[in-house]
Image (tube, rainbow, N blue to C red):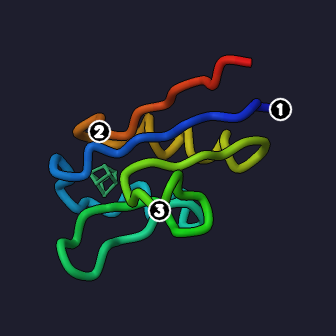
């Protein structure tokens, strides 16, 4: 089981390929205005669309989505305990 992770999306680099949204729709969504991927409100850190927090099974799927991003703008950071 994966511990707590911080996820960042460098949104300006998003090419809107939708891969992350398809792989993990619970965590990623498309911003209707700028069309870039963003973190779903439930998982955001301080309501920042480019930063989120996730753990457990969902974190595994988010990591998979990050691996599949063709422009590598989804980054995983491990919280220090
Ligand atoms: S996989 Fe990467 S480029 Fe594609 S929509 Fe998600 S963040 Fe954007």
Disc 3: which residue: 47
**Element type where label 1 sits in the image:** loop
Residue at image position (57%, 46%) is 62
Badge 2 density bin: few <14, some 14–19, many ≥20, Cα 10 Å: some
Disc 1: which residue: 1
Is label 2 within 8 A of ligand 1 (CB to nearest ligand atom)?
Answer: yes
- Where in the figure is residue 32, as x and y percent of width and height? 28, 81
The residue closer to the viewer here, 3 or 58, is 3
**Element type where label 3 sits in the image:** loop
The residue closer to the viewer here, 18 or 36, is 36
**Element type where label 2 sits in the image:** loop
Say above or below: 18 vs 71: below
Residue at image position (60%, 58%) is 43
Disc 2: which residue: 73
Q: Earlier in the sequence, mark 2 or mark 3?
A: 3
Report how far apart the C-alphas of labels 1 and 2 lie in the structure: 24 Å
Q: Earlier in the sequence, mark 1 or mark 2?
A: 1
The residue closer to the viewer here, 74 or 50, is 50
- Where in the figure is residue 46, as x and y percent of width and height? 50, 55
Q: Earlier in the sequence, mark 3 or mark 1?
A: 1
Drawn side of residue 15 relative to residue 5, left or right: left
Report how far apart the C-alphas of labels 3 and 1 lie in the structure: 26 Å
Q: Which residue is outermost to the front?
A: 46
Quadrant of the frame with the N terminus? top right
Badge 3 density bin: few <14, some 14–19, many ≥20, Cα 10 Å: few
């Amino acid at each position: 089981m994966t511990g707590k992770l911080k996820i960042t999306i460098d949104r300006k680099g998003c090419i809107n390929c939708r891969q992350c949204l398809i792989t993990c729709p619970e965590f990623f969504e498309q911003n209707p205005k700028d069309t870039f991927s963003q973190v779903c409100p439930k998982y955001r850190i301080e309501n920042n669309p480019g930063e989120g927090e996730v753990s457990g099974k969902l974190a595994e799927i988010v990591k998979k989505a990050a691996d599949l991003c063709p422009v590598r703008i989804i980054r995983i950071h491990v919280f220090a305990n």
